Image: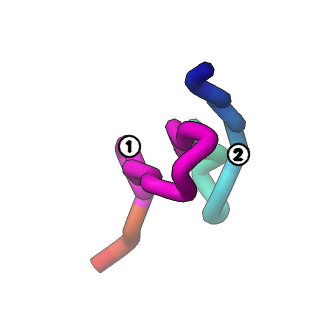
Amino acid sequence: MLKIQGFTVNPIQENTYIVSDSTGEAALIDCGALF
């Protein structure tokens, strides 16, 4: 089963998501990094 967690990050409040499964594999989507 996939688990999706959403976070609001950095000063401009970008949305970031972590998608993971029961094996511990995960992907970070739109990390909202500032350069």
Q: Residue at x 39, y 67 (%)?
A: 33
Q: Determine which residue is flagged by label 2.
A: 8
Say which amino acid is labelled 1. Answer: Ile
Please say whether residue 17 is visible from this viewpoint: no
Q: Residue at x 59, y 51 (%)?
A: 12
Say which amino acid is labelled 2. Answer: Thr
Asked which secondary structure carries label 1, the reply is: strand
Above or below 34: residue 6? above
Q: Quadrant of the N terminus?
A: top right
Above or below 22: residue 34? below
Q: Which stretch appears magenta?
A: 16-32
| Residue 20 located within the stretch drawn in magenta | yes
Above or below 6: residue 35? below
Q: Residue pushed farthest bottom?
A: 35
Q: Determine which residue is flagged by label 1.
A: 29
Q: Residue at x 62, y 63 (%)?
A: 10
Occupied quadrant, residue 35: bottom left
Q: Which mark is residue 12?
A: none
Q: How many marks?
A: 2
Q: Residue pushed farthest front?
A: 23
Occupied quadrant, residue 14: top right
Relative image position of residue 16 (x, y in whole percent)? 54, 44
Residue 25 placement, left or right of 24: left
Mark 2 vs 1, N-terminal side: 2
Relative image position of residue 27 (x, y in whole percent)? 38, 49
Relative image position of residue 2 (x, y in whole percent)? 57, 24
Above or below 11: residue 35? below
| Residue 14 located within the stretch drawn in magenta | no
Residue in front for this viewpoint, 29 or 33 = 29
Asked which secondary structure carries label 2, the reply is: strand
Relative image position of residue 26 (x, y in whole percent)? 45, 52
